[in-house]
Image: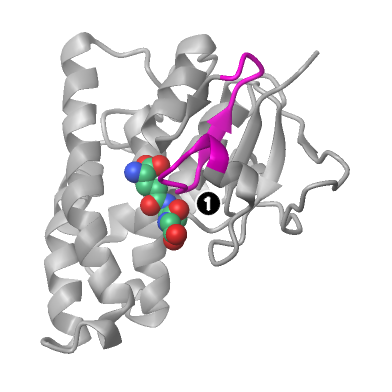
Amino acid sequence: MPIPVLYTFRRCPFAIRARMALASAGISFQVREVVLGNKPQHLLDVSAKATVPVLLLPDGQVIEESLDILHWALDANDPCGWKHWTQDELLRMDALVAVNDDVFKLHLDCYKYADRFPEHPRQHYRELAEATIAELELRLQKTTYLFGETLSFADVAIFPFVRQFANVEPEWFETTPYPSLRAWLSGILASSLFESVMFRYKPWQPGDAKVQFDAVQGAS
Ligand SMILES: N[C@@H](CCC(=O)N[C@@H](CS)C(=O)NCC(=O)O)C(=O)O
């Protein structure tokens, strides 16, 4: 049976959230690892904006936003209940993910690449990003995950960005007053589901043999 094709980049936080959702939903896919500086022509053909991840379904439909891939996968199959929440909670999750994507991501990029934004020292950008980090910490002091005692799609959508934040200055991060956030992040990073989607694939080229990610139903 034909399976979807995912254009992906291992470290990309948007691609990580998409791979996690596909894996959790038990949806196997063909992996096409992309080098961002040398994107395959077929990716450019199916998606003019050519960001990763891009999911190409067997019927020719193209899903080119990570959140759309995540929701497509979970709406097809959500054995871990990442979307089994009330409508009101789901809307609040959307809002938190939007803050991550629209605000935190910008500050994170300035923090990561501070030398490209010399108007301010790195610490300035870190402090801007910490506004979101502190908000997440407050939530995580009350509950194990962002919206309660079980993982939700919001945790999955947001943690790859916090992972990047933690990796900019790992020694500093270990000393910060965000213990609940650190525990939350470590827990997800230690999960077999996360490990399964972080396998290193060699960059895809046309003509390569198919490389398949075999999803295990109900993996967490
Ligand atoms: N809104 C998009 C953003 C995806 C995105 O920006 N991905 C980055 C990699 S992390 C990318 O492909 N950048 C294009 C490039 O570097 O050429 C999504 O959620 O899928």
Residue 46 pos. (x, y %): 54, 35
Comparing 86 with 16, the one in front is: 16
Is residue 64 one of those drawn in magenta?
Answer: no
Quarter occupied by the C terminus: top right
Q: Main secondary structure of the magenta part?
A: loop
> Which amino acid, by three-letter code, is at mark 1?
Leu
Q: Is residue 191 visible?
A: no
Which residues are the magenta region? 45-60
Quarter occupied by the N terminus: top right
Q: Is residue 120 above or below residue 132?
A: below
Residue 143 pos. (x, y %): 26, 36
Q: Is residue 118 above or below residue 208?
A: below
Q: Is residue 217 above or below residue 177?
A: above
Name the residue located 21 percent from the left edge and 84 percent from the top edge: 122
Considering every residue shown, the one lying at the far right of the view is 209
Comparing 44 with 75, the one in front is: 44
Q: Is residue 82 left or right of residue 87?
A: right
